[in-house]
Image (cartoon, rainbow, N blue to C red):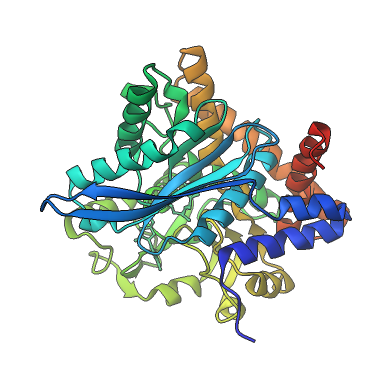
Amino acid sequence: MSENLNPFSIAQAQLDEAAAVLQLDPQMHAFLREPMREFHFTIPIKMDDGQTKTFRGYRVQYNDARGPAKGGIRFHPDETIDTVRALAAWMTWKTAVADIPLGGGKGGVICNPRELSQGELERLSRGYMRNITRYVGLTQDVPAPDVNTNPQVMAWMLDEYESIMGHREPGVITGKPLALGGSAGRTPATALGGLFAIREAAKNLNLSLENATCAIQGYGNVGSFAHKLGSNQFGLKVVAVSDEFGAIYNENGLDPKAVSQHLRRNGKLKDCPNTENLTNAELLELEVDILIPAAIENQLTSQNADRIKTKIVAELANGPTTPEADNILNDKGTYIIPDFLCNAGGVIVSYFEMVQNSYQFYWDESMVHERLDKKITTAFNAVHRMSQKQSVDTRVAAYLVAVDRVAEAVRLRGWV
Ligand code: NAD
């Protein structure tokens, strides 16, 4: 039978495995397997050539028992409702494992932002927000950026929301530009949180991070900061990085400044001076201490897992490993830092952003990162301890911690 790569089926299968270990009440299990609310809508946009083009948008509020739903918005040509559902489920587990008072949600628009002018992108962002205005808010659901959306997109969405509502409410959306109430230290937060988790995993494996070798798949917001901060603050030797067009390699380590400069000038990583070109598949199979998938879903599968030769897989991307690959890697003794723990730094600092917006009092970057370190380290230790106590792999352990917390809130509310 071929491997099931539907992200929502994978998210449900992961929950099923944890539910069996937790001996979760079947009625609670059935409730947690499905999103609580979904919004499907069309967004008609006047294009620059005068024609109207209709885009499809989604917002899923998977579970808000622990607090308002929270999750990013993706603009992607391959977006599907099942991808949004899976990402919303993972947000629910992520906010729970990080122990922040929020639920899980996610949004998306099927579009190719590279084919849109700035004006079209602005109209699409505002059109998306018009459709969800009555369902979001500081106490309901708080969106944020994700793949192909950024602080400018958040600024347009914030302005649309506030124009409709007739008041200022910066906490309705996070990942905003600093000038509109964004938090210091938000942009590198996902990568930095992942690096704090890698530091904790390395301690458990007696692995020194100084000159530990590392390969990073994906060179967007998350991957590029993982390279820069990993090299400059944690002493990692990043020997390979990739984007959708291919990978580059240097056994002595890649200089983040030189790589970013090359990417800015050429639009892709390939052919960077002083490096060797590799394929993306080759990057994943390098013999390195730490492998960081920071691109898209389903990158480590039954097709390549037996050739992955790394001590730690740090999943900064969402859903990069299929359940079959998980089994193969766990059998080999690979230490996996599961996605919704590893990449929780973004939502943790988004939560800090909401807190600062509510108080209208702002922290400096060092305070943001110090508090992020505390949150991620606490979450990592809870998962690691659970994995040892229950003799389960780290992904199941993360589910055990998260599902237990969400189920408790659901039970206390009397929903199940
Ligand atoms: P991004 O759009 O900024 O970057 C994505 C990168 O992946 C780009 O460099 C792209 O070229 C590359 N890529 C795409 N397909 C690829 C492939 N097949 N092989 C290799 N590289 C490929 O996105 P991002 O914000 O950096 O997010 C990356 C991942 O991290 C996603 O899974 C996202 O859901 C997850 N994540 C992001 C955040 C955040 O704060 N940005 C938070 C949590 C999780």
> Quarter of the image holding residue 94?
top right
* Quarter containing the C terminus: top right
* 278 lies left or right of 40: left
**Residue in the image at 39% along x and 17% along y:** 168
195 up-or-down from 267: above or below: above
* 156 lies left or right of 390: left
**Residue in the image at 77% along x and 55% along y:** 30
Decide which of 365, 325 is in the foreground and name it.
325
Decide which of 173, 298 is in the foreground and name it.
173
**Residue in the image at 79% along x and 43% along y:** 407
Decide which of 208, 348 is in the foreground and name it.
348
Residue 84 placed where, x, y %? 51, 54
* 204 lies left or right of 288: right
**Residue in the image at 76% along x and 47% along y:** 403
Which residue of the protein is positioned furthest toward the bottom in this rendering? 1
144 up-or-down from 331: above or below: above
Residue 292 placed where, x, y %? 51, 59
* Quarter containing the N terminus: bottom right
Residue 405 placed where, x, y %? 77, 40
Whether residue 167 is visible here, answered yes or no, is: yes
Whether residue 213 is visible here, answered yes or no, is: no
Give ligand 1's quarter of the image: bottom left
